[in-house]
Amino acid sequence: MKRSKSVKLVLIGGLSAGALAGCDSSPNQPGAFRPGNVYTNNYYVARLGYYHAPSRAWFPLPYNHYDARRNAYYHGGAWSPTPQMTITNLSEPTPEALRAARAATAPAGTVRRSGFGSTSRYHGVYS
């Protein structure tokens, strides 16, 4: 009996997909922002921004982002005429940055929907 290469590839692909399915490294998972976790420079998280390792916090623009109109570089929440040169490429966020990260990535609460407010309610008698 001859075995097909395509069957082997399908089996290997299925095993790989199954193994990787449990490896979600998304920081948006509950409890992902914990003390002791470290992040690299420009690690991006939706609704939070880019992590600046030297500043140990998240910011809206990438680390050392250059803006030609300003002729300046962005790092640590401020603009500078020169890029910040540092060997820090990995760090643990400050406790304040962790709290902000948890708040920014927390699931939205229950939204109360009741039509158009009180205009859709009538508390009188129709005549």
Image (cartoon, rainbow, N blue to C red):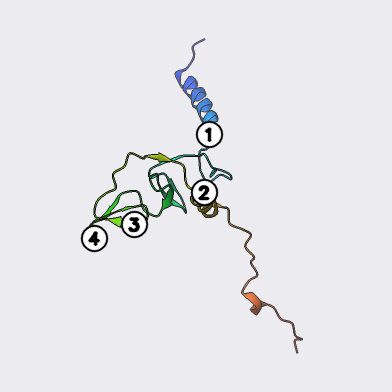
Q: Earlier in the sequence, mark 2 or mark 3?
A: 3
The answer to whether marks 2 and 3 mark residues whose Cβ atoms lie closer than 8 Å is no
- Say which residue appears at 49% left-offset and 23% top-offset: 12
Q: Which mark lies nearer to you, 3 or 4?
A: 3
Image mark count:
4
Q: Nearer the viewer, residue 34 or 20?
A: 34
**Secondary structure at numbered mark 1:** loop
**Secondary structure at numbered mark 2:** helix
Amino acid type indicated by mark 4: Arg
Q: Nearer the viewer, residue 59 or 36?
A: 36
Q: Earlier in the sequence, mark 1 or mark 4?
A: 1
Residue 20 versus residue 119 in the image, above or below:
above
Q: Which mark lies nearer to you, 2 or 4?
A: 2
The residue under label 1 is 23
Amino acid type indicated by mark 3: Ala
Where residue 69 is drawn, which disc sits there?
4
Amino acid type indicated by mark 2: Pro
The residue under label 3 is 78
Amino acid type indicated by mark 1: Cys
| Residue 84: percent from left, percent from top | 29, 47
Q: CA distance from mark 2 to mark 4?
A: 34 Å
